[in-house]
Image: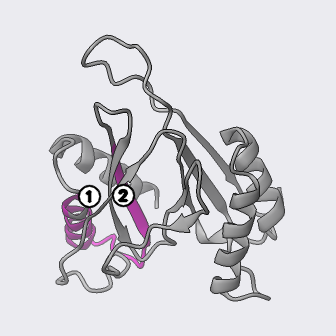
Amino acid sequence: MGQLRSMLRGLAWNNGPECLPSAVLTMLEDAAEGLDIASFTTVVHARLQRRPDGAWHMTWSNAGHPPPLLIPARADPYFLTGADTDPPLCVAPVLPRTSHTHILAPGDTLLLYTDGLIETPTASLDDGQHRLLTAAAHQRGASLSDLLGSLQRSLSDNRDDIALIAFRADPPTSAPPGHRGPLRVRATRQRPGR
């Protein structure tokens, strides 16, 4: 996983922000196959760009990973599934990959997570996703740190690795023209038994 993550970051950086996430995942899959480090791997690759109106334009591609969760500032949470479902990396390398888009309004929160958060031996994946939707709705106004901590405590059974990344689309500030400002992202990672 470390090798694939490093290659993904390098490919995304080298090809620039205009390269679609689906193209980056296709290049990653080709490299993994060519270097003989291919394995069944799920991944979401997303790009966020601030628009002049303060909203954020998200473009993403999902290779068999649990779908990103959007927690709107003023509506119920829902999963960003896109129109097509792409397989995990190195399962069907000849199939084209798909990019999807969505606009995050100021105050919306995006959550990326691993299956360790929602999957348990005693419940189905659908049950885990429903529990995540319910827990996220109750934590809508919480800080990113509190949101991540609460979701981890209330949903995880601590049997699997968990990684969570949250992004909140802050309202625009009176920054100089052309300044994009810092991304406010919080992340946490937990290994089983901790």
Residue 54 among magenta residues: no
Q: Is mark 2 on a helix, strand or loop?
A: strand
- The reply, left or right, for residue 61 in relation to residue 44 is left
Please rate how many residues cluster around mark 2, counting C-alpha atoms within 10 Å: few if below 14, some from 14 to 19, many from 20: some
Magenta stretch: includes residue 43: yes
Q: Residue 188 vs residue 62: left or right?
A: right
Q: Quadrant of residue 128?
A: bottom right
Give the quarter of the figure containing the C terminus: bottom right
Figure quadrant of residue 107: top right
Q: Residue at x 21, y 42 (%)?
A: 17
Q: Nearer the viewer, residue 99 or 191?
A: 99
Where does residue 9 sit, x and y in percent of width and height? 33, 47
Mark 1 burial class by Cα count in 10 Å: few <14, some 14-19, many 20+: many
The picture places residue 66, in percent across and down from the top left corner, at 52, 72
Q: Do the residues labelled 2 and 1 touch (CB within 8 Å)?
A: yes
Q: Which residue lies furthest to the front in this view?
A: 74
- Residue range (magenta): 23-48
98 left or right, relative to 191? left
On screen, 99 above or below 85?
above
Q: Name the residue under label 2.
A: 45
* Amino acid at dot 1: Pro
Q: Mark 1 sits on what residue?
A: 21
Q: Say which of 4 and 80 sits in front.
A: 80
Q: Residue at x 46, y 55 (%)?
A: 2
Chain-order first, disc 2 or disc 1:
1
